[in-house]
Amino acid sequence: MKNKLLQKRALVTGGSGFIGSHLCEELLARGFKVTVVDNLATSAKSNLSAIIKNKNFKFYKGSVLDVKLMRRLIRSCDIVYHMAAAVGVKYILDNPLGSILTNIKGTEIIFELADKYHKKVVLASTSEVYGKHACEPFKEEDDRILGPVNKSRWSYAEAKAMDEFLALAYLKERKLPVVIVRFFNTVGPRQTGRYGMVLPGFILKAIQNKPITVYGDGAQMRSFTFVKDAVDAVVELSLNAQAEGQVFNVGGAANISIKDLAYKVKERAGSSSQIIFVPYAEAYKGNAEDFEDMVCRIPDVNKLQKMIGFKPEFSIDEIIDRTIDYFRKVKKCDLGGCLR
Ligand code: UDP
């Protein structure tokens, strides 16, 4: 397997981001040559410190909106992992315009060039596209139930859904090989709490013994998956010809309410933090009119299990412990909060 993959060249857009950087490590470990293009808008080059000197690795600081650069990089790779996107509820609410442009225009450029040079594309999408369903596991073929356009949170779901439509249209009309992965809440080391993501936020508070803020009543359910399990699934899907032209949920390792998550983080960190409940209007102050929460977001992963035998290795306790270890080691203030 390893020999067969040797010399295969992967381009990872957004490769210095949280999921992207773990994906790069996995691809290198499997014998790929890896090139990253990342504008470092919400990511950090330090995420690449374990691989930056690897002879099979190259980094370009640049935007997926830079057609000239993307043409050069896509022409000289075998497969594109399109991970670059504006993500994070807080980030989307604060930067609706830039987010829409990056998430739609950037993907258009990738697909146009991938089509021109006939390169396979793995598109990172999101469970957000399902919208506000009832509390039952989402299947890939389910209807989507979204909120109104004056709540800009939904622009992210729309933009990523448009990316998916684009991928499937290129497949249908141009026979471009594509695979679409819908991440549920992927968590672990290097995820920043700066853009609203809940787990790094809770952990940073817990290890500083500061109040952990649960928004709403905390009954909202999410499905958390360790980043290593998620990237493993992505690579397996990308190597499986049967997966081409299909959409897959990636997640499902641990389904838990946000309130329970808060108590678990507090306990596992041995923290004296208070757990406080904050109304949404206060939590998303300044953007409250653009925000609407989802009561539940849990995947059905039968399709993923059938295709690659997906079985997440990390439980919620292990996920939390490993992420706590990471944050305890990091002494910087640029990871979503200061630890000092
Ligand atoms: N949340 C919370 N406290 C925080 C940050 C987030 O209670 O400090 C809640 C948020 O309102 C949502 C859930 O945690 O219900 C997950 O939020 P996140 O932004 O991580 O991801 P989402 O699943 O909403 O995209």
Image (spheres, rainbow, N blue to C red):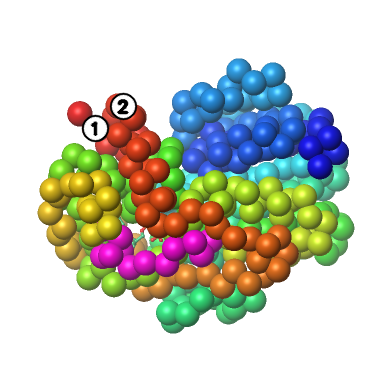
Q: Which residue corresponds to the image point at 60% horizontal and 48% vertical from the top-left?
A: 231
Residue 199 drawn at (x, y percent): 34, 51
Residue 227 in the figure: left or right of residue 249: left
Amino acid type at mark 2 = Lys
Can you identify the residue that label 1 sits on?
Answer: 339
Q: Which residues are magenta?
A: 251-262
Q: Amino acid at mark 1?
A: Leu
The C terminus - image quarter: top left
Q: Nearer the viewer, residue 151 or 73?
A: 73
- Counting every numbered tag in the picture gives 2
Residue 34 lies left or right of residue 2; in this view the side is left
Whether residue 247 is situated above or below residue 191 in the rendered picture: below
Is 260 part of what is drawn in magenta?
yes
Residue drawn at the location 37% of the way across and 67% of the way down: 256
Some atom of ligand 1 lies within 8 Å of the CB belonging to the residue at label 1: no
Q: Is residue 180 magenta?
A: no
Percent coordinates x, y for residue 174 in the rendering: 86, 57
116 or 211, which lies in front?
211
Question: N-terminal of the two: label 2 or label 1?
Answer: 2
SS at badge 1: loop
- In this view, the residue in front, 298 or 283, is 298
Query: Crowding near pointer 2: few (<14 within 10 Å), some, many (20+)?
Result: few
- Indicate left or right for 78 with 280 as reference: right
- The answer to whether any part of residue 268 appears in the image is yes
Q: Secondary structure at mark 2?
A: loop
At a point 30% along the width and 60% down the height, the residue shown is: 261
Q: Are marks 2 and 1 in contact (CB under 8 Å)?
A: yes
Quarter of the image that includes the N terminus: top right
- Name the residue carrying label 2: 332
| Residue 106 point in image, percent of width and height | 62, 45
Residue 92, percent across and down?
42, 52
Residue at 60% x, 64% y: name it: 249
